[in-house]
Amino acid sequence: MGALLGVSSAIMPLQFCSPAKKEDEVQMETPEVSKSKLKDFGIQLYSVKDEMAADAKATMTALAGFGYSQFEGFDGGKGVLWGMKPAEFKSLTTDLGVKMVASHANVFDNLDAQAADAKEAGLEYLICPWIGPQKTIDEYKIIADKFNKAAETLKSHDLKFAYHNHDYTFVNLEGLVPQDLLIENTDPALVDFEMDIYWVHVAGFNPSEYLSKYPGRFKLCHLKDAEADKGDGEERGVLFGSGEIPFTKIVKESIDLGMEYFIVEQERFVGTNPMEAAEKNAAYLKNVFDY
């Protein structure tokens, strides 16, 4: 029997005789992480404010041709519909294949009339773009109450309210961050927020971390990049994708936290002009950017 075992050992295939590899010697293939692209993205028309003032229809037509499928407006002195009747404005955006998501507006004046026109024109949001730095926390609490009331009015017109931040609501005041107070003192069923990622970044906050602090509260954002701080206090805006803000991480995480609309905005133009920048930003989002 011993002899037979010896013969068996001699003819056993080598792979059964070789010592087992240690676990850390086994190389596993790392699966490729699948990436996504933004199917839809918009532009804040303030980025091309002079062109809009000169010829709103031609400018919007050109922007749609660049690949923007969403617009966000502002009041450039002719109202948020640029002097057009609501039905005319809606017909224009429909023909262009563009959704007019929102407009920045003075939500504290003549809101019912603005809301009626906005609803007929097909908008979803009216957004408060500016409140200015307040002197005390109590003043921010008053603003929060005004947001709630404006949002109630917009809800009666089947519209939504949002507030767009700048950096001043991220400057510590009386030991608090005013932006925190605005979020925590407004009704989440009524008041949404639009994160201007540029202003959060230059204020010294991490946009991803701040979004995760208040999941579901930010439904819109401004995609606006920033070059490195030169310490001169000057505006730092640059073409999207050419700055230092980690948008891949921010966009990916923000979608899981409730972000719905991604709106390009640029206000500083170095070596380019507003329409050229708008075209380059759209091309980058279509052809290069993924998350």
Image: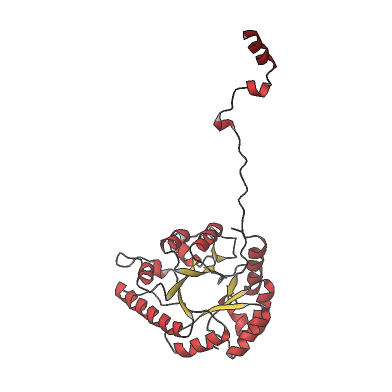
Of 148 and 179, nearer the camera is 148
Report whether 140 appears left or right of 92. left
Of 280 and 157, nearer the camera is 157
Q: Residue at x 38, y 82 (%)?
A: 149
Q: Residue at x 60, y 89 (%)?
A: 87
Question: x, y (%) of residue 88?
Answer: 62, 89
Q: Residue at x 42, y 74 (%)?
A: 189
Relative to 7, say whether 266 is above or below.
below
Question: x, y (%) of residue 3?
Answer: 65, 8
Question: x, y (%) of residue 117?
Answer: 53, 88
Q: Quadrant of residue 177?
A: bottom left
Report whether 214 appears left or right of 74. left
Query: Is residue 14 among what the camera can see?
Result: yes
Q: Residue at x 40, y 66 (%)?
A: 170
Of 185 and 63, nearer the camera is 185
Report whether 240 appears left or right of 61. left
Q: Quadrant of the C terminus?
A: bottom right
Q: Quadrant of residue 26?
A: top right
